[in-house]
Image (tube, rainbow, N blue to C red):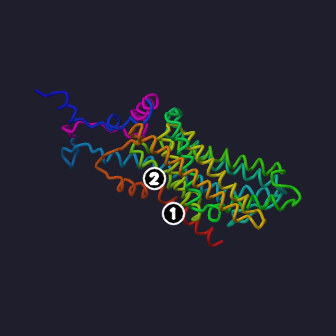
């Protein structure tokens, strides 16, 4: 006579076999419900009885394969991701330029060239154009992803702060990383350009006395950070979690770094993205990712402001501040890590095991169309920026 356990061994159900111990029950309930929707082609909800086989003409009796189902679902998801990235790149490099060219033709004081990342003209016009293009570039792909994946808001955005200490730890780690990677010299090109522009408008007035610069700074540091994290750590991340948190962390970090289209920025953006993802998973809230991205931008801006100071003590002040930030942030992150491990050994990342290894899954994903093609385009755009 067969027991219940014997029966369970013959059943494969990838939705129920997923590790739901890392997040709260409300999130898990919604995530399960979304994954069980058979009408949604982007959910990996394969289930079968190992002993059941299907007859196919020319092949005979064959068994359903979870690996084949996984590949099909990944292909569909990466088609959506690739299309969203293509929207981002197209708006950033073509549509944005066309908007500026059109405004220039009708007499608006804003100008650029096709291969330039900079705008020229009046301060109000430049700030307005930068804000509009940035919003379109981020919001259109995010809206497209949201509509296609049909994900509930409570799944799309983790909203329960389970462990507040992980928020502080993630911020501390991001500050330490910013210092170690020496972002003042290598990763602040665009921030330096806009700061230099506003500083040169009127040497008798501080940039903080110019309303346009203040508006742009608030927009870039807060609005862009939140919007970008909504795109990378929202529906895309949740859809990729079906195949394990490590997979979702790596793919979203690769996406974020590629979409900078800048070889100098890619390494730091990749690491910051990993910190944002892990911090979100550990804390339970996307607010942690918002905070990490915002702090990263604030650190970048602060160092730019210090470097633009022409005093003899600029390098000493900058290095002292960087050293102080690194010591405090590293100590904070280590302290929280030790305190957390002494208190409990909680497991924060959902693992996924299948016949396909993580390495093979990543390779298959990078080869998926149009994701792989858009990634190549991003690298070409980065190369063009180096040349020009």
Q: How many marks?
A: 2
Q: Residue at x 41, y 35 (%)?
A: 35
Q: Residue at x 48, y 46 (%)?
A: 278
Q: Residue furthest right?
A: 204
- For mark 1, give the secondary structure: helix
Task: Return the x and y of residue 34 as percentages of the image width and height.
Answer: 44, 33
Q: Quadrant of residue 9?
A: top left
Magenta span contains residue 117:
no
Q: Residue at x 21, y 42 (%)?
A: 55
260 sits to left or right of 104: left
Q: What residue did someone put label 2 on?
A: 250
Task: Return the x and y of residue 109 as percentages of the image width and height.
Answer: 83, 58
Task: Return the x and y of residue 164 as percentages of the image width and height.
Answer: 53, 36
Instruction: Say whether marks 1 and 2 touch (CB < 8 Å).
Output: no
Magenta span contains residue 30:
yes
User: Considering depth in this image, is 106 or 163 the residue closer to the camera?
Assistant: 163
Does label 1 or label 2 sit earlier along the sequence?
A: 2
Task: Using a 10 Å C-alpha cutoff, classify the residue at mark 2 as few (fewer than 14 neighbours), some (14 to 19) or many (20 or more).
Answer: some
**Label 1 – label 2 distance at C-alpha:** 17 Å
The image shows residue 26, relative to residue 202, as above or below, that is above
- For mark 2, give the secondary structure: helix
9 sits to left or right of 281: left
Task: Return the x and y of residue 250 as percentages of the image width and height.
Answer: 45, 52
Task: Using a 10 Å C-alpha cutoff, classify the residue at mark 1 as few (fewer than 14 neighbours), some (14 to 19) or many (20 or more).
Answer: few
Q: Quadrant of the C terminus?
A: bottom right
User: Considering depth in this image, is 240 or 103 the residue closer to the camera?
Assistant: 240
Q: Quadrant of residue 144?
A: top right
Which of discs 1 and 2 lies nearer the camera? The answer is 2
Q: Quadrant of the N terminus?
A: top left
What are the residue bounds of the magenta stretch? Answer: 25-53
Q: What residue did someone put label 1 on?
A: 376
């Amino acid at each position: 006579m067969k027991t219940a356990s014997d029966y369970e061994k013959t059943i494969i159900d990838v939705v129920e076999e997923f590790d739901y111990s890392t997040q709260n029950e409300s999130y898990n309930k919604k995530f399960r419900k979304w994954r069980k929707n058979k009408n949604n082609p982007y959910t990996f909800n394969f289930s079968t009885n190992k002993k059941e086989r299907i007859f196919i003409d020319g092949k005979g009796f064959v068994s359903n394969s979870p690996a084949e189902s996984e590949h099909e679902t990944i292909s569909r998801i990466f088609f959506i991701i690739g299309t969203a990235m293509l929207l981002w790149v197209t708006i950033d490099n073509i549509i944005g330029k066309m908007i500026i060219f059109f405004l220039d033709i009708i007499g608006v004081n804003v100008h650029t060239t096709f291969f330039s990342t900079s705008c020229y003209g009046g301060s109000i016009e430049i700030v307005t154009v930068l804000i509009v293009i940035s919003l379109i570039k981020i919001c259109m792909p995010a809206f497209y992803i949201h509509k296609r994946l049909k994900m509930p808001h409570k799944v799309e955005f983790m909203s329960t702060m389970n462990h507040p200490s992980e928020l502080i730890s993630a911020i501390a780690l991001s500050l330490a990383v910013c210092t170690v990677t020496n972002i003042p010299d290598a990763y602040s090109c665009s921030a330096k350009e806009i700061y230099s522009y506003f500083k040169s408008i009127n040497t008798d007035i501080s940039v903080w006395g110019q309303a346009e610069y203040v508006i742009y700074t608030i927009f870039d540091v807060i609005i862009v950070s939140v919007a970008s994290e909504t795109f990378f750590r929202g529906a895309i991340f949740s859809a990729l979690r079906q195949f394990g948190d490590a997979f979702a962390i790596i793919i979203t970090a690769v996406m974020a770094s590629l979409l900078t289209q800048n070889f100098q920025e890619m390494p730091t953006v990749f690491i910051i993205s990993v910190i944002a993802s892990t911090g979100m998973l550990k804390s339970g809230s996307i607010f942690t990712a918002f905070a990490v991205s915002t702090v990263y931008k604030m650190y970048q801006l602060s160092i730019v402001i210090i470097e633009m100071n022409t005093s003899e003590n600029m390098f000493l002040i900058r290095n002292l501040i960087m050293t102080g930030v690194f010591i405090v942030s590293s100590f904070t992150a280590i302290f929280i890590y030790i305190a957390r491990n002494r208190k409990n050994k909680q497991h924060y990342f959902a693992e996924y095991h299948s016949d396909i290894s993580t390495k093979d899954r990543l390779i298959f994903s990078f080869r998926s169309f149009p994701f792989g093609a858009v990634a190549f385009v991003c690298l070409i755009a980065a190369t063009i920026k180096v040349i020009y």
